[in-house]
Image (cartoon, helix red, strand yellow):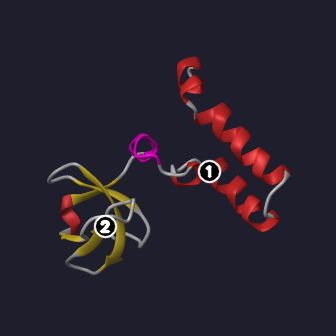
Amino acid sequence: MTYRSGSYVVDVRDGRLAQVAEAADDLVHVRSPSGGGEPWTVPPDALRLATREERQAAGLRPYETGCDECAALEAVRRVAGSGDATAAAYTHWIVAHSASATRRGN
């Protein structure tokens, strides 16, 4: 599998969540999603894409969790700058992805 720069992956050798910094045919350079710590190199066959639940548990921003609606709302918010677009993005996140939404079965 080919991994795109910016993708969130799991290093299956130790279960660490990482973000792809650069991918070549034989090695993938990854770093911590928080940007801290030393980057490391992983063979592509030792990686898998991170699940939405793994990205959420890591505290990534809503539009980085793999939710198509979050991504669309974030794109609109970036263009608009703030106001109603920001409220719509945050409202969606709270209703669809917050801990209370999980308890409600959403």
- Residue at (70, 40) in percent of width and height: 92
Q: Which residues are magenta?
A: 52-59
Q: Which circle, 2 or 1, is nearer the viewer?
A: 2
Element carrying mark 2: strand
Q: Give whichever of 14, 34 is nearer the camera.
A: 34
Above or below residue 4? Residue 61 is: above
Quadrant of the snapshot with the C terminus: top right
Image disc number at residue 31? 2
Is residue 72 something one can see in this rendering?
A: yes
Quadrant of the snapshot with the N terminus: bottom left
Quarter of the image where one finds residue 25: bottom left
Crowding around mark 2 (Cα neighbors within 10 Å: few <14, some 14 to 19, many 20+) is: many
Examine the structure image and report whether residue 103 is included in the region drawn in magenta. Answer: no
Image position, residue 68 (x, y; %): 62, 50
Q: CA distance from mark 2 to mark 1?
A: 24 Å
The answer to whether mark 2 and mark 1 are in CB contact below 8 A is no
Image position, residue 54 (x, y; %): 38, 43
Location of mark 1 (residue): 68
Image disc number at residue 23? none
Quarter of the image where one finds residue 11: bottom left
Q: Amino acid at mark 2?
A: Arg
Element carrying mark 1: helix
- In this rendering, would 73 be left or right of 58? right
- Residue at (67, 48) in percent of width and height: 69
Going from N to C along the chain, the mark reached first, 2 or 1, is 2
**Given the current orientation, which residue lies at the most extreme top position?**
104
User: Of helix, strand and loop, which mostly describes the magenta segment?
Assistant: helix
**Given the current orientation, which residue lies at the most extreme bottom position?**
24
Above or below residue 49? Residue 26 is: below
Image position, residue 100 (x, y; %): 58, 23
